[in-house]
Image: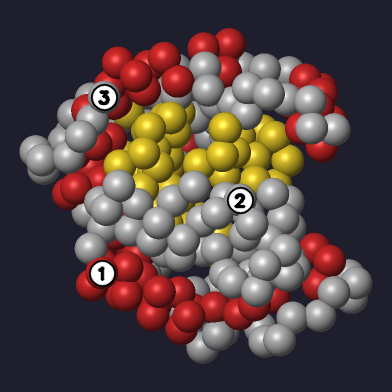
Amino acid sequence: MADVPIDADRFGQDGVLVVPDLLDEAEIAALRARAEWVASGQAEHVATARLQVEPRVARGEEHADNYADSLRKMSHIAFCDEVFAAHARNEKILDVVEALLGPDLKLYQDQLFMKPPRVGSRQRYHQDAPLGFHIDPPDMVTCWAALDDATIDNGCLWMLPGTHCYGYIDQDEWHSYEEQALAGDLPAERPIELKAGDCSFHHGLILHSSRPNRSARRRRGYATHYVSARCRYTGNPEHNDALLVRGHSHEGCI
């Protein structure tokens, strides 16, 4: 395994950890270049349905300088693009995930959050696991790789440490946390500020959000969602395209 600091006990308590400088400059440059190309709309192998425009731009309430800066996110791109697929299999990332989930790992989903300058929207408080991740138990960890510096000003992630221990939280309660955050009355929340190349890892049940990007700078982050290959898949079998990225598959599991 790579020589990276992994405090699995702390992760068990908080549901989040940060590994500084996990990606080097060359790796970040490759991801940025590929993101620009795909976001330009010129990558024919990436369906336009995988590219989501910022809601206010789509409604005509805001204007972006170019198409790439109108995008909110790009989804499921590691399943069709070799550069993003290579990142999802990055041994340094998988070493951390293995320390948290165990040796047999599958990539369930991935999302490149563009968070463009000025128009990048807020993401409300939520848990990832209930949102289309059909696994039991919810043994899931997301690696969030910073392609740009992520700061409070340009919309970094915010976490509520320890909330993964509550299990599945009713979505009405998500709204309550969101209202508290908007009112500035959620002292437990913590910003996850990252430098480009840093990676944060969070549990699939931790409550988290992100603020709007009011700055003139991008805040791109590439999220790869990993699950234990020992989880039972509870969705439609025809829709199970999870990729084995380390270890072995198990009969009757995802």
Q: CA distance from mark 3 to mark 2?
A: 25 Å
Question: Which amino acid type corresponds to the residue marked 1 in the rendered image?
Answer: Glu
Q: What residue is at 67 percent from the left and 17 percent from the top?
A: 169
Pointer 3 residue: 7
Give how far apart the Cα atoms at labels 1 and 3 are.
Answer: 25 Å
Mark 1 neighbour class, 10 Å CA radius: few under 14, some 14 to 19, many 20 or more: few
Q: Amino acid at mark 2?
A: Ile
Residue 169 lies left or right of residue 193; in this view the side is right
Residue appearing at x 57%, y 44% in the figure = 157
Q: Earlier in the sequence, mark 2 or mark 1?
A: 1
Measuring from the top left, give residue 195's x and y in whole percent: 40, 56
Which residue is identified by label 2?
Answer: 152
Q: Using the numbered discs, state the Cα–Cα distance from disc 2 to disc 1 in whole angstroms.
A: 23 Å
- Nearest the eye: 93 or 216: 216
Q: Earlier in the sequence, mark 1 or mark 3?
A: 3
34 on left or right of 68: left
Tell me: residue 179, above or below residue 12: below
- Where residue 118 appears, as percent x and y from the top left, is 73, 70
The amino acid type of the residue labelled 3 equals Asp
Residue 120 in sight here:
no
Badge 3 element: loop
Local secondary structure at mark 2: loop
Q: Nearer the viewer, mark 2 or mark 1?
A: 2
Q: Nearer the viewer, mark 3 or mark 2?
A: 2
Q: Viewer-proximal residue, 137 or 59?
A: 59
Judging by the rendered image, the residue that carries numbered circle 1 is 25
Do callouts 1 and 3 mark residues in contact (Cβ within 8 Å)? no
Total tally of numbered discs in the picture = 3
Q: Residue at x 36, y 70 (%)?
A: 31
User: Residue 108: x and y, percent?
Assistant: 42, 43
